[in-house]
Image: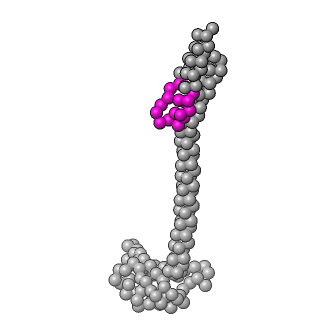
Amino acid sequence: VFAASDESLVYKWVVPDYLAEAVEEGADSSWTLDGVPELGLEGEHTIVLTMVGDPANGLHYGAVSVTNLADVYADAQAFFDEERRNIDLFIWLVVACSVFIVIIISFIILRLLIRKKITEPVDELSTAAEQVMQGNLEVEITVHSGEEFEGLKIAFCEMIDSMRRLVARSMDEE
């Protein structure tokens, strides 16, 4: 700051040769490992040079801004760490939701398979058994090769056939 109401903010220093050369070469920035000793700054710094011209009076003004690279790096690292935490959280949420969806879909598929392979055949046999209990021996049960309850259905059909023969024999005896 070269003009301020607070005198402690005003730097009164002669522009160093390396900055004057950079301005003359038209550079817009410079980098230094040794800091800017003229300003009491140590360590790596970036120096940004800005030239401003005033066409009305033909004067050219130079503005110099100095930034400590350690501070810039720390800010960038903090931003990177925060973004990494956000991305990690997002990834974990996506993974958790995906696992939950896979579990739900698996549950639905297993439920449908159990219903088709076990519950429906058992319900069919149960309905047929109720009809036989009520005296209907004309019950038809469809047996598909390779199904889960194929043996049970065959045994049930044979039982109904035996009952029909038994009823037919008893009717013939009367």
Most extreme residue toward the left is: 25
Q: Which residues are magenta?
A: 141-157
Q: Position of residue 21 (x, y in %)?
A: 37, 87
Q: Is residue 6 visible?
A: yes
Q: Quadrant of residue 19?
A: bottom left
Query: Please, which residue is most extreme toward the front here?
Result: 173
Residue 18 highlighted magenta (yes or no)? no
Which residue is found at the position 56% from the left and 59% from the top?
Answer: 92
Against 88, residue 153 (above or below) is: above
Query: Compared with residue 160, is residue 93 higher up or lower down, i.e. above or below?
Result: below
Residue 116 visible in rendering = no
Residue in front for this viewpoint, 75 or 31: 75
Q: Which residue of the protein is positioned furthest toward the right in this rendering?
A: 133
In reply to whether residue 150 is colored magenta, the answer given is yes
Number of marks in the rendered image? 0
Q: Nearer the viewer, residue 144 or 48?
A: 144
Give 12 or 100, whichever is nearer the viewer: 100
Query: Residue 109 at x, y = what percent?
Result: 53, 41
Residue 174 location (% of width, % of height) = 63, 8
- The residue lying toward the viewer, choosing from 91 and 150, is 150
Q: Is residue 103 above or below residue 83?
A: above
Q: Position of residue 142 (x, y in %)?
A: 50, 26
What's the residue at 41%, 79% (across, down)?
A: 29
Display coloring: one colour
What residue is shown at x 35% (from left), y 80% (from top)? 26
Residue furthest toward the top? 174
Question: Which residue does the image show at 41% across and 75% down from the upper left?
Answer: 52
Task: Please indicate whether residue 56 sits to the left or right of residue 120 in the image.
Answer: left
